[in-house]
Amino acid sequence: MGFVIAVDGPAASGKGTVASRLAAHYGYPYLDTGLLYRAVGWRLQTNRGDLGDAAAAEAIARALDVSELEMPEVRTRAAGEAASRVAVHPGVRAALLDLQRQFAAQEPGSVLDGRDIGTVIAPAAQAKLFVTARPEVRAERRWKQLCGQGETVAFEDVLADIRIRDERDSGRASAPLTQAADAVLLDTSHLTIEAAFDAARRIVEAARAK
Ligand code: C5P
């Protein structure tokens, strides 16, 4: 196993930005694991399936075509909501496990972000970060991002989405969102992207020095 950097945290915490910047800095491949769940949720909805149908969601996860991760549709607000609903099914999580573990096994290293990287996917990761921010700050970031993608949505609705998603992701029985005991907490509420990246890099450097 190479040097794995596991970046977990709630929606719009800044974990994706931090993770992709770390990957570029160290020259490691980067996997945004949220896209896997988004692609499953989006595909199930497109097939007019029921997001609560665990067997149908698992079948889609098992046959997932990774080229679908590139589609702009998986980055929409609707896909994020669908993702968190299919992510509760243990069969879906099991179906996506090997792909994520294989990605994490690459030499000389890799960066993965998600909800359960440091706890379930790569518990032996050498560097673990738990990136968070206040819900209002996260909602504002997500709202700006969605507006930039051309979606018309009210800030209050995005904040409500974030709160529902936090509750669903933290409350589910299978691989809930939780900070690994050995993860370092990084609160980005008051940090610029540059400052958040700098703090993250210091955390990784400290882990590399061990
Ligand atoms: O990170 P992102 O907001 O794209 O993730 C969408 C949803 O996918 C999350 O709300 C969560 O329910 C699910 N997810 C997960 N485990 C991961 C990554 C994402 O359950 N490792």
Image (tube, rainbow, N blue to C red):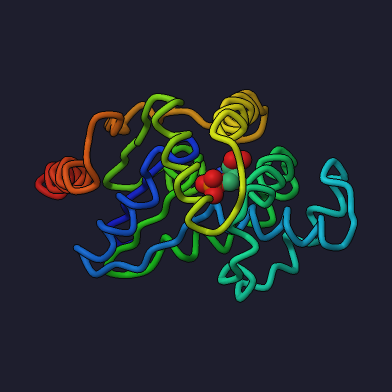
Towards the viewer: 151 or 83:
151
Placement of 166 over or under 27, stated as above or below: above
- Asked where in the image residue 118 lies, by quadrant, the reply is top left
**Which residue extends farthest left?**
209
Q: Position of residue 46 (x, y in %)?
A: 82, 62
Could you tell whether 27 is left or right of 6 in the image? left
Q: Residue at x 88, y 45 (%)?
A: 53
Could you tell whether 3 is left or right of 14 in the image? left
Q: Residue at x 65, y 63 (%)?
A: 73
Could you tell whether 114 is left or right of 27 in the image? right
**Which residue extends farthest bottom?**
67
Q: Position of residue 91 (x, y in %)?
A: 75, 47
Q: Position of residue 57 (x, y in %)?
A: 80, 53
- Asked where in the image residue 187 lies, by quadrant, the reply is top left
| Viewport quadrant of the C terminus | top left
| Viewport quadrant of the N terminus | bottom left
Q: Position of residue 142 (x, y in %)?
A: 48, 43
Q: Residue at x 67, y 28 (%)?
A: 173
Q: Residue at x 45, y 26 (%)?
A: 135
Q: Quadrant of ligand 1?
A: top right
Number of callouts: 0
- Asked where in the image residue 51 lies, by quadrant, the reply is top right
